[in-house]
Image (cartoon, rainbow, N blue to C red):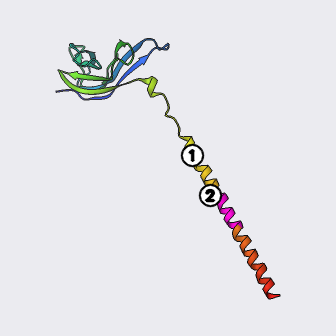
Amino acid sequence: MAPKTRNFRAMEMPDFAGRRYQLIVSGEVYVTAGNQTPELTSHSPQGFNPRIKLLDLSIKTTGPIGTDPVEWRKINPPYREPTNGRQYDEVSVLFEGDVIERLPVEHPKTVAAAPARKAAKKKIVKKKAAKKKKAKKAVKKKAAKKTKKKAKKAKKKRL
């Protein structure tokens, strides 16, 4: 039976100069004894799709007697492998030959870019609203002129 997992993440990080890249996979595994530690290793053979990295999850027993507490343990150290940048799109984590996690590989250079704002449409809307106000004022002026003319005619008829 596969262990429970949570907070798994795969990232392809560049160094500060952006020349060398490294695939980093981390996460947490639910263990049943204090002497057990989770570990990720590269699966062999890798598979037919070169864009998907296969990793084996194993739970190592570090001593003869473990404590009873059942807890979540981080994969420590996280799995690291040098890459050539955008080498992988997905990481599959296997336990005893079965896939238990499929992780999309994050590329922080592209994730950090903010989406472009659509400020041009807002300006157009404001201009249209301003034109409508001018048109309303012009209509009011015409109506006022007509009423003045009617008032003058009415005065002339009275006299």
Q: Secondary structure at mark 2?
A: helix
- Asked whether, in this view, residue 118 is left or right of residue 127, the answer is left
Q: Position of residue 38 (x, y in %)?
A: 27, 19
Q: What is the quadrant of residue 143 in the picture? A: bottom right
Residue occupying image coordinates x 47% and y 27%? 112
Question: Looking at this view, is 96 or 143 the one in front?
Answer: 143
The residue positioned farthest toward the bottom in the image shown: 158
Residue 96, horizontal then vertical, whole percent? 17, 21
Q: Which residue is mark 2?
A: 132
Q: Which residue is under mark 1?
A: 122
Q: Main secondary structure of the magenta part?
A: helix
**Magenta span has 6?**
no
Q: Secondary structure at mark 1?
A: helix
- Disc with the residue nearer the chain's start (1 vs 2): 1
The magenta span reads 132-141
Residue visible at 61% across and 54% down in the picture = 129
What is the CA distance from the residue labelled 1 to the residue labelled 2? 16 Å
- The kind of residue tagged 2 is Lys
For image coordinates 19% across by 26% down, the residue present is 2
Point out the image quarter for the N terminus.
top left
The one nearer the camera, 142 or 105, is 142
Q: Kindly tell me whether residue 36 is visible in this rendering.
A: no
